[in-house]
Image (tube, helix red, strand yellow):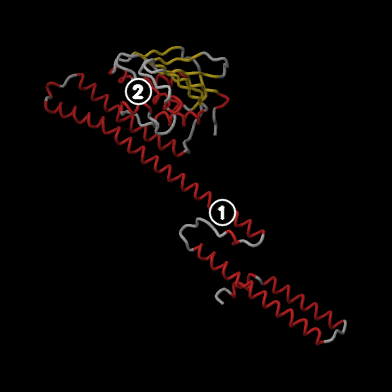
Amino acid sequence: MKYLGIYIKDRKMYFFLTAFICGVTAVINYLYSAPLQAGLYAFKISLTVLVIVCAADYVHFYKKHENLQRHCHLKEVHALEEDAAHTAIERDYQQLVLKLIQEKAQLAEHMQKKQTDMMDYYAIWAHQIKTPIAAVDLLLQVMEENPQEVAEQDIKELKSELFKIDFYVEAVMNYLRLEDLSSDFRFETTAVETVVKKAVKRFAGQFIHRQITLAMENLHSEIETDEKWLLFILEQLLSNAVKYTQKGGTVKIYEKETLLKSDTVLVIEDNGIGIQSEDLPRIMERGYTGYNGRGASKSSGIGLYLCKKAADQLGIDIEVESEPYHGTKVLLTIRQHHTRHE
């Protein structure tokens, strides 16, 4: 009788209705002078049936309530019994609860994957940043042992390694911003040449250190975009261009003519080691390093993935053309009518 009070309260409408019907029946029998024995006989039969039905209903109610209470005290609910619902409304609620359980499971799976991806990225990032830190430490040791013999080349090497550290730190910050998907995009009219020059200025030391020739041509367009994230995309692409272009190579940045005047195609071209044809379709995938990345042990497989993610938010299409040992050409197509303004 643990839930008897709850049961009576839950079924009170039915009890009131039954009492009302019995009352109406008694009044009708009285008005029509029906025999008292017949009325009492009908009442006893009705009461007996009501008790049997209520007893069976209470047992069913008790089991269902006990089962649901047990689920309520569980830390996680993964499923419900298929025969738990007996009415149309109960089945509707059951479908709703099952849908919520499925959505919760999908969200948990998504968060777990996101956490795993983040840990994988941190592991790669830690491995990447250890290299320039070790190089800086070695250079400082050499300088301390022979301070009089510190050459200009040593200073350049030190600045180059510090640049890599700074770039990797900023990369992980941008990774977190993009993974959060709540980054604030601020769209303004921006000159392509201005953004390109900012990106190039940051890599000026790397170009000089690696003796890479830089050519900028025909940068005259003005576009509506988020300058900060376009700069991020250009810096990632320039980083790859410098990384995979041999000493004494060339990097070109220019605008390509298009059929639609509203479109702007910005090209970053190098004459570096190029990309294998089988790697091209997958280079934008998260964690994919390809032949070059595996061979040089320099790639995290995250840079181009983040470029693609940021580009999608800005309404920019990225296309890569490359041949092994014949360089790489990256085309950024900025379609103004596709730019996102959310």
| Numbered disc 1: secondary structure | helix
| Numbered disc 2: secondary structure | helix
Residue located 21% across and 22% down the image: 155
Circle 1 crowding by C-alpha within 10 Å: few under 14, some 14–19, many from 20: some
**What separation in Å lies between label 2 and label 1 (alpha carbons)?**
53 Å
Total labels drawn: 2
Residue 189 place in picture, x, y as percent: 51, 23
The residue under label 2 is: 202
Up-down: is 123 above or below 269? below
* Comparing labels 2 and 1, the label whose residue is closer to the camera: 1
Quarter in which the N terminus is drawn? bottom right
Residue located 20% across and 19% down the image: 152
Up-down: is 238 above or below 54? above
Amino acid type for the residue under numbered disc 1? Leu
Residue located 46% across and 12% down the image: 218
Circle 2 crowding by C-alpha within 10 Å: few under 14, some 14–19, many from 20: some
The residue under label 1 is: 98
Residue 284 place in picture, x, y as percent: 44, 29
- 276 vs 259, left or right, is left
Amino acid type for the residue under numbered disc 2? Arg
Residue 59 place in picture, x, y as percent: 60, 72
Circles 2 and 1, Cβ within 8 Å, touching? The answer is no
Q: Please give the label number shown on residue 161.
A: none
Up-down: is 215 above or below 52? above
The quarter of the picture where residue 10 lies is: bottom right
Quarter in which the C terminus is drawn? top right
